[in-house]
Amino acid sequence: MGLEEYCEFREAFLGVAVAELGRQRPVAFAAHAVQVLGAGGGAHEGGGAAGGGAAGGGSWQRREAALFAATASVEGLLSRVLAPPGMPPPAAAAETGTLLVPLLRAALAPPPAAASAAGVALLLRARCKLVTALAPFLAAAPAEHGLEAALRGVLGCLPHAAATTAAAALESVVHLSRRCADEIASSEPLIEALLDALGRQLADPDAERRAALISACGRVVACSASHAERFVAPFVAELQRASATLDGAADYLGPAYESRARVAAQLAERLGDATAALAPLRPLPKPALVAVRTHL
Amino acid sequence: MWPAWCGIAPAAVRAGVEAQVLPALCRLAQEALRAVRAQFAPLLPQTAAVLTSAFDASPSAPLLELADALLEAFAGAATAEEAAAFASLLDTLSARTLRALGASPLEQPALLAALLSHADLHAKLLTPSLATAASMPALLSLAASLLGTCREPEPLDAAMSLLGAAAAAARGTAAQLGYTGTEAEAAAHRARLQAALGAAGEAVVRGAIVGLVETLPEPSWPCIADMVAPMLHLEPWARPNGLRAWAHAALAALPATGGAPDARCREALLTLLCAFPDPCTAAQRVMRRAPSASGAGMGLAQP
């Protein structure tokens, strides 16, 4: 059984049971995870906490299992921490909520050096899944709850070699772009980190993954008045390059249709990237609108 | 981006890879249009030029969908000159598409549906452009011809929608149709649409009756009433050689299976069609109703 199949199997069969137990005892799994991961001494990869190296004790398997259970049960916990729109916070919300910050910090700690490659992949995947699940919590109070560290923590997992970890990281970035777009856009370092990660991931050969990340960045940029130009510029450059290549293709590639079709397929991919970039920009504010317009 | 965008279509046509490139190119233009909205206006002429030249070389549904997006973006505030430009765009696209469809339009259902949908959008968003387009009679005639022959849902739905929208436009007042021009202009446009719908009348009636019995898929049946109702009282349809004669001939030609429909049934259908109340008159009565508390201020009541 591959890593991906194992994760899917576990989520489908064990995840539901853990979630149900979590509804009965909302704090139990999160508290256990904090204990296992030893949140007190953790240092997350995004920086900010004191200390260094991997946090907590126990084998990587115990740590990963604890994170999995905490993530599967976190929905019940969030309902006791976050107030529905227009309602006062639930009783003891602040007390319960204090558990989530150390949990997140522990999940963002670097994996133990002793973990195997598959172990690291699973631990990082568990981190991304937890950040995805905590997106509403992060949106509620970005600075206090650690949005910056969480975003940096998942951005670092985007190029991971294990497909399941990279997919979880992408899902997490997409989720954060939906729940926390304004908060990310209002932080210069965060939006820069996001656009830097995008620059690195543009070489991803998977068009669907690329488009999802581009659209996630577009959603954040649409909330910013000053980053539209930086966001759109690489797509314009790529498009110009691909267009010039196609322009010469008929001459230098001669009658071989396969060669021209290959160039055309590359150009269609670049067009797809540019489309994914523009798609979330529909609610552009005026300054960003003008910036994008000048690039058209 | 746009200079590159404009260069891609001709390059793709030259390289013979337009089928691979044009769909993505059109999607990009549609997103750009939605992102910058009215700010796209300065790019409209060059975009339309690229669209028509690419379409001339290789007519395809994505290019017609791009034309839809341009119309949707700019029809709302179009001046008479811009409406004329859109009419010219419709003529160019129609001429090339009709040439490509040839004598067997049903062999390219996607292209056929895209053309009829584009014309339908003209009827709904910018009636003057459809009414003044030289291609309008041919488009209505094409739509009518599909009713009794086409089994593909997309072109069929587009054809019925176009005929219904053209009929509504042929019966509406300038105010109802959102004309910025005079009532005289609106009357001229109505007359042109009515003449074209009159010419297509026999095919519409025959297609609707034969289609209901033989070819039209069941979900399309209710649409037939929406489409035909505004046409029933058009002046060319009310003539002695109009609706009654067309319906009589179509009903008489219906094949009988096990004695059904019998003569009495055919006669009842004919009477029903010819005595059907005019929905447009009824609608106008509603429009003229005295202002009510809920209707006041919503532009519904006319003195």
Image (cartoon, coloured by chain):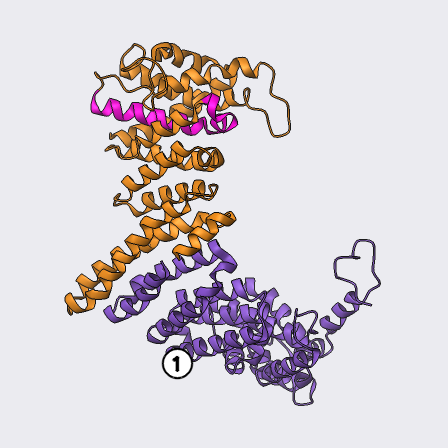
Above or below residue A239? Residue A73 is: above
**In this view of the protein, can residue B215 be seen by the observer?**
no
In magenta, the rendered stretch is A116-145
**Residue A80 in the image, given as x and y percentages of width and height:** 55, 19
- Quickly name the residue at label 1: B99
Image quadrant where one finds the C terminus of chain B: bottom right
The colour chain A appears in is orange
Determine whether, in the image, residue B251 is placed left or right of residue A101.
right
**Residue B99 in the image, given as x and y percentages of width and height:** 39, 80
Q: Residue at x 38, y 32 (%)?
A: A189
Amino acid under disc 1: Arg
- The secondary structure type at the circle numbered 1 is helix
Give B292 or B231, whichever is nearer the viewer.
B292
- Label 1 Cα crowd, 10 Å radius (few <14 / some 14-19 / many 20+): few
**Residue A232 in the image, given as x and y percentages of width and height:** 37, 49
Above or below residue B94? Residue A53 is: above
Q: Is residue A224 magenta?
A: no
Residue B226, by quadrant, is bottom right
Give B250 or A123, whichever is nearer the viewer.
A123
* Chain appearing in purple on the rendered image: B
Q: Residue at x 41, y 56 (%)?
A: A294
Above or below residue A196? Residue A144 is: above
**Residue B11 in the image, given as x and y percentages of width and height:** 27, 67
Give B117 or B68, whichever is nearer the viewer.
B68
